[in-house]
Image: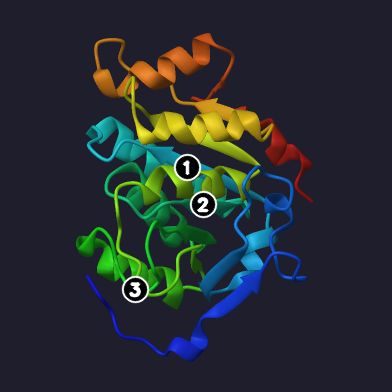
Amino acid sequence: MNINFDKSKIKVIKCGDGAYPKKLENIYAKPQVLYVLGNEKLLNDKSIAVIGCRDCTNYGLKNSYKFAYELARKGVCIVSGLARGIDSYAHIGALKAEGKTVAVLGCGLDIVYPPENFELYKAIIKNNGAIITEYPLGTKPEKMNFPIRNRIISGMSDGVLVVEAKKRSGTMITVGYALEQGKDVYAIPGNISSSTSYGTNELIKEGAIPITKIEDFEFLYQIP
């Protein structure tokens, strides 16, 4: 869905600018430019990426909302990708908590994808959040754009919370970037019979930090 807005409100942040996110400066293939709509100050805040399946379960939706809400209430910025499912509920949870959230797009700022997230897109901006992308205006949401943008989701964050993930998915691509970038990976355990919990359960077996309550995020105790 194409949207009309005041293009003068877009901030163009180039690599090397003072406003460029410090956490992105040392990642592999860092974006050379970011287009930002909304509160660019959030790009350097303490943040957690909340990610997972588009075709998730109710269990996943509830946990995405719950942990995003609780983290946002504690001052943590929630970063996600505005996709269907887990991403959407992460942004919604942060907004409900009157907290901070950043959406990283795989298209231009003038396109809302998926189109049903048009109201969510507007709510993020209205509530002092930010929408960002490395793609210029008019860039369509091509399939190949999303795995690439995932390096920004993990790169901008201090850690990554995987809510639900299938065996092979874009979520696991983001986890790969996070590990490469030296980020903490958290995972919510799930039903061993559910395909959407296969990825999270495997991540825990491989050393991801299991999350069942907000107190499991040890970094929270380091926030002033």
Question: In the structure shown, which secondary structural element does the residue marked by tag 2 occupy?
Answer: strand
Q: Residue at x 30, y 64 (%)?
A: 140
Q: Residue at x 39, y 56 (%)?
A: 106
Q: Is residue 101 visible?
A: yes
Residue 73: image x %, image y %?
56, 53
- Give the residue type at disc 3: Gly
Residue 153: image x %, image y %?
52, 48
Q: Residues within 10 Å of mark 1 (few under 14, many from 20)?
A: many
Q: What is the C-alpha distance between the residues marked 3 and 1?
A: 27 Å
The tag earlier along the polypeptide, 1 or 2, is 1
Question: In the structure shown, which secondary structural element does the residue marked by tag 3 occupy?
Answer: loop
- Give the residue type at disc 1: Val
Callout 1–callout 2 Cβ contact below 8 Å: yes
Callout 3–callout 1 Cβ contact below 8 Å: no
Q: Is residue 67 visible?
A: no
State whether residue 118 is above or below residue 45. below
Residue to which mark 2 is pinned = 79
